[in-house]
Image (tube, grey):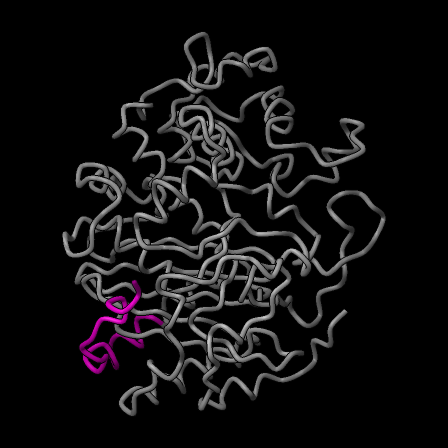
Amino acid sequence: MRNKNILYAAAATLGLVVIVLMTAGRSCQAEDEPQVQGVNAWITNALSDTADLKGLDRKIAQYMQQWQLKGLSLAVMRNDSLLYAKGYGWADEERQEAMEPYHLLRIASVSKLVTAAAVMRLQEEGKLSLRDSVFGPNGILAEYNDAIKDRNHYRITVEDLLRHKGGFTVRGGDPMFSTRTIMRVNHLDVPPTNAELARIVLGRRLGYLPGTSQSYSNFGFVLLSLIIEKVSGQPYADYVQEHILQPAGCMDFHIAGNYPADAHRHEVHYYVPVNEVPVPEFNNSGDSVVRCYGGNNITALSGAGAWVASAPEVARFVAAIDARGILPDVIGPESVADMVEYFDKETYSLGWNDTEPESGWTRSGTFSGTSALVKYYPDGECWVLITNTSTWKGPGLARYTSGLFRSLREQYSDRLPARNLFENSF
């Protein structure tokens, strides 16, 4: 296990080294892997350094030290223009590789926003409706009906899954993070595929009647991933790349791997809290692993949490689903309005965690080795922060990052350079 007792003083050394993109990152991929395109192909820390923002850098360094973060990536966009993008600390401390804006990080449940946009696009294409039944005689996934014992599953709609109202709970453990138990109980020698997992989970009783309550459900978004595959006729990632991400100008999103050897070109190394002990490997191998590398099956999270991306490209994606009419959107204004419609604090928005009109749109994501927050404010400013280190706060870190955003906006929003770093992306 890597030495986790190294202090993060380097994060405060704010004159980060500019690294030429095509020679910077480590790569575990084949030599003929396509080169990075789009936003990630040219933005470096050199373009983001300005004298007026040194105080911002110091606050970021303090935040990293407070939460013992090895590295983080920050992007700030206003009215679809990328004003600021910078990496802080280490992408890989042991290799002495500084974080740059083009580095890729796991974005965890921010992936749900991508999946929701894909569902809305499919509705626009006439291939599904949010009102469609997921199961039952006329359900999109009717081929799973034979696995269902509780016929209340037939009440689940696509919208229920998007709003975490499908009736699924985690009282017996989150199925996406309970692979070892599921393998043992079902006498499996290898982890189940998502199709096999769906049959296992659908054999259980629901925790409540669909549509009558809500409980955050990663499994519900895995079902949405299967729905996307069914109605599009393409693998989930292929459809999303072709119809959502690439049209949005996002050329460097990828589905995450589980181990360092699976890392994509320019993907960071991930770290866990210094005192976290090894855990059993998710596949019941009997080995102990660092939780962020083999503790859970990240790849299987699919549309619930498996994407990796850079902070600037996450901002670019958000610009493509905000209906501002500046950069082209990948879904229509009615779909955007549906995604951000606000009801109350007890109702999830579509893909977003929350879209309260006065505070803006929020999407967070956290699991071992990473934490991500996207905050889109009513004035059109969007802040994206992604770390390569998890903390003992888990999902609770998002609240502190949101507080950091408030402080930084108050002091530095009017100092951000008037430019658009997206302009030279293509």
User: Left or right: 128 with respect to 65?
Assistant: left
User: Left or right: 335 with respect to 222?
Assistant: left
Residue at screen point 45% across, 21% down: 209
The quadrant in which the N terminus is found is bottom right
Nearer to the camera, 394 or 35: 35
Residue at screen point 53% across, 75% down: 23
User: Left or right: 388 with respect to 347?
Assistant: right
Determine which quarter of the picture holds residue 195.
top right
Residue 222 coordinates in the image, percent (x, y): 51, 35
The span picked out in magenta is: 405-426
Q: Is residue 92 above or below residue 353?
A: below
- All told, the count of numbered labels is 0
Residue at screen point 61% across, 52% down: 257
User: Left or right: 133 with respect to 247?
Assistant: right
Nearer to the camera, 342 or 367: 367
Residue 14 coordinates in the image, percent (x, y): 45, 89
